[in-house]
Image (cartoon, rainbow, N blue to C red):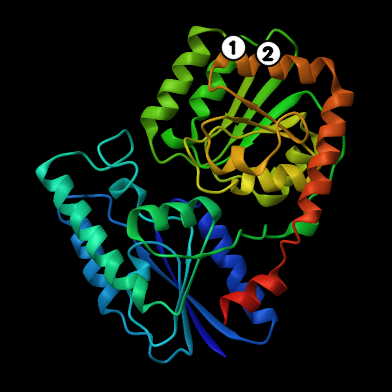
Amino acid sequence: MKIALFITVTPFVVGGSELLTNDLKRQLELRGHTAKLFRIPFIMEFETGMFVNAMSAQMLNFDDYDILIAFKWPAYLAVHRHKNLWMFHQFRQAYDLFGKPYGLPDTDMGRAIKEMVEQTDNVAFPQANKIFAIPNSVKRLRYYSGFEAEKMLCPLPNVDNYFKQNVGDFIYCPSRIDGMKRQLLAVETMRYVTSGAKLIIDGKCGDLAILTEMGAVIKKYGLEEKVTIHAEFVPEEDKIKRYSECLAGIYLPVDEDSPGFVTLEAFYSRKLIITANDSGGVADYVEDGYDAFVIKPNPKDIAEKIDYLYEHKDVAEQMGENAYKYMIGQNLNWDETTRRLLG
C-alpha cells in the first residue's frame, strides 16, 4: 500500500510530533508498505502567513497514494479520497487558548484567523474517513467542533532502548524549550531545593527570551552548580543514558493534551515523573503518589517533593517500578497502531 504522511512543522524545531511521524514512516515500511513523509512549514506570521498555510495545504494533490494520514492544522485540510486524521491537537490558539497567553490575540485580525481556522476545520473533518486523537484532543474536538474521534495515544519511538542504570541525584527535563513547556518554572524551583538534587534541561529553544530569562534566574540566585541547560538537540543515546541515571523526570507544561514523550520515556526508564496539576494530559495519565507527583505549579511545593525524593531514593525507585508496570500494561505498540491508522 502507498501511504502519504503529511504534517505541519515549525522550521528548525524538532519536537515529539516530528519524532513520531519519522518513526511511523519507518514502522509502515517495516510492515511492507511504501510510505513518504511530506512536511509543510508553519509560518508564524499571523497576518498573512496562516492564510497562505491553509491555501497551500488545500492545493496539494496526493492522488497517487492509497491513503493520506494527516496530523496537524493545516496539513489535515488536504483533500483525498481516503484521508485519516491522527490529530495531536487542533490549532488550540483559535480555540481554548484564544485571547489568552500563547493564543491568538482578541483583535480584528485574531478573530479573522480564528474564524478561518474554525471554518476550515468544519470542512476538513467531515471529509475524513477516520479521526484519531489523543484523549484531551478528543474532548476538545467534541466541545468546540461537535465531531467525534477515536482515542489513540502515540507509541514511543525506539522503546526497547530505554533502561534503568540507577536512581541518581538529578531531575531530568528533556523537551523543546518553550514558554508552554515551563522549563522556567523548573529552574525557579531549584532556588528552594535544599538537598543535593540538581536539574538538567535538554532541548532546542525557539525563543531566546525564555533562555535569557532562565539564565538570569540562574545567575541571580547562584544556581550555576544546581542547574545545567543544554539548549540544543541532544542525541538519542545521551538522552536515554540520562534517563537511566536520573532521580526522576520532570514535565510541567501548560494544559498539555497528551502525557508527552517525556512521561513515556521516564516510565520506560523506570522513573517517576514530577508534573503539575494544571498540566492537562500529563496529570490525567499518571497517579499521584504511585508513579508520579502531581503538584501545584508552585516552585516551593515542587522543591519540597524533589528534596523528599533525594532523601528517600527507595521511594523514588519503587515509584519508578510502578511507572514501568503501568506503561507495559497500556499495550502501546506499532502493530495495533498501524492497523487502526490504515483502516
The residue under label 1 is 300
Q: Is residue 122 left or right of residue 224?
A: left
Which residue occupies 30% across, 41% down?
A: 103
Q: Residues within 10 Å of mark 2 (few under 14, many from 20)?
A: some
Spatial separation of the CA atoms under disc 1 and disc 2 = 6 Å
Considering depth in this image, is 139 or 15 the residue closer to the camera?
Answer: 139
Q: Which mark is residue 304?
A: 2
Q: Position of residue 333 (x, y in %)?
A: 72, 66
Residue 90 versus residue 266 in the image, above or below: below
Residue 8 versus residue 326 in the image, above or below: below
Which residue occupies 74% across, 38% down?
A: 242
Secondary element under disc 2, as helix, strand or loop, is helix
Residue 241 versus residue 34 in the image, above or below: above
The amino acid beneath tag 1 is Lys
Tell me the quarter of the image containing the N terminus.
Answer: bottom right
Residue 172 versus residue 112 in the image, above or below: above
Secondary element under disc 1, as helix, strand or loop, is helix
Which residue occupies 75% across, 28% down?
A: 289
Q: Residues within 10 Å of mark 1 (few under 14, many from 20)?
A: some
Q: Position of residue 185 (x, y in %)?
A: 51, 23
Tell me the quarter of the image containing the C terminus.
Answer: bottom right
Labels 1 and 2 touching (C-beta < 8 A): yes
The amino acid beneath tag 2 is Glu
Q: Position of residue 126 (x, y in %)?
A: 35, 75
